[in-house]
Amino acid sequence: MNKKVIFLDVDGTITNYSNQIPASTIEAIRQARANGHLVFTVTGRSKAEMYDEIIDIGFDGYIGGNGSYIEVGDQVLFEQVVDFDDAKAIVDWLHEQGLEFYLESNSGLYASENFVERGTPVMIEYTRYKGQENAEQTTVDSAFPNMIYGADLYRNDLNKVSFILDSYQNYLDAKAKFSHLKVGTWGGAGEKALFGDIGVAQIDKAKAIDLLLEHLNMKREDTFAFGDAKIDIPMLAYCAVGVAVDSGGDEIKAMADYITDAVDDDGIYNAFKHFGLI
């Protein structure tokens, strides 16, 4: 088979919803690279959330912040952060609204003053939403093991901000207040969302992939994309073959070219095998 470029979402695709990585997924990625294919993660995570158990699998590069950062090997190909004035305005506004939040940057995750207290019940609810067992045991520290507390919250290296929604109206207010930025929700569909987020405008996973392919001098027809959620739809639509995992959402499964098994049912390995990547 000709050399292919494989793009993998992380949460819910490489990992299951308990942040566990099936051994078969690790084997599939390593075999594909041994066969000469290139494999990249494409995730909303900042580098600070790319923990050793993910990095140690071995990848050819990383797209983070839902497309705001591209790294190939040791080279930073592209980086776009939130303007400092905007970053400061976001922090000030969230404080004014009494909303707890954390800042996402490649240097770390930085929590607001009362994030642990307010975030614990929310993370338990998020764990239940994902169908994980023993949800009541979830803590902020178990969900974000490297969270940094007490740091300066005015930052010039900000990828995005996630904030706890007291109501859906908080999201609508943020969208109106920061209409020039990318404002979304996560942790539930529509008005059931648990978090809002604010980040760099006019970026997405597909645009980042396009930039990366130009750098690699690789063709779009030689690409595969794997994902589980609505935010992955642009990259599945862009790539030649878009694969959704069966444990993912209905929207992405409806538009995918192929639906593989659930993550915990060796979905990534089985899809790689199906397409002759391994």
Image: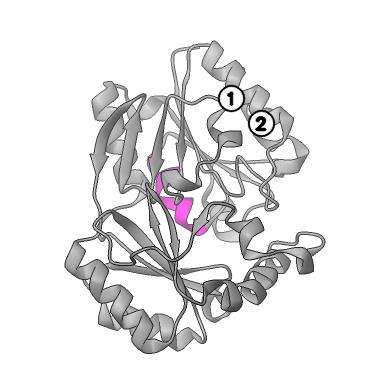
Tell me if residue 178 is in the magenta stretch.
no
- State the SS at label 2: helix
Between residue 52 and residue 40, name the one nearer to us.
52
Kindly identify which numbered label has been placed on residue 29.
Answer: 1
Task: State the residue at coordinates (50%, 72%).
Answer: 195
Between residue 115 and residue 17, name the one nearer to us.
115
Circle 2 is placed at which residue position?
25
Crowding around mark 2 (Cα neighbors within 10 Å: few <14, some 14 to 19, many 20+) is: many
**Residue 244 drawn at (x, y percent):** 59, 45
Q: Quadrant of residue 77?
A: top left
Task: State the residue at coordinates (50%, 80%).
Answer: 165
Q: Report the label total.
A: 2
Decide if residue 95 is on the left or right side of residue 157.
right
Decide if residue 207 is on the left or right side of residue 191.
left
Q: Is residue 277 visible?
A: no
Q: Quadrant of residue 201?
A: bottom left
Tell me if residue 231 is in the magenta stretch.
yes
- Residues in magenta, as a range: 230-238
Decide if residue 226 is on the left or right side of residue 160.
right
**Residue 215 drawn at (x, y percent):** 24, 26
| Mark 1 in CB contact with mark 2 (< 8 angstroms) | yes
Q: Amino acid at mark 1?
A: Ile
* Residue 51 drawn above or below residue 105: above
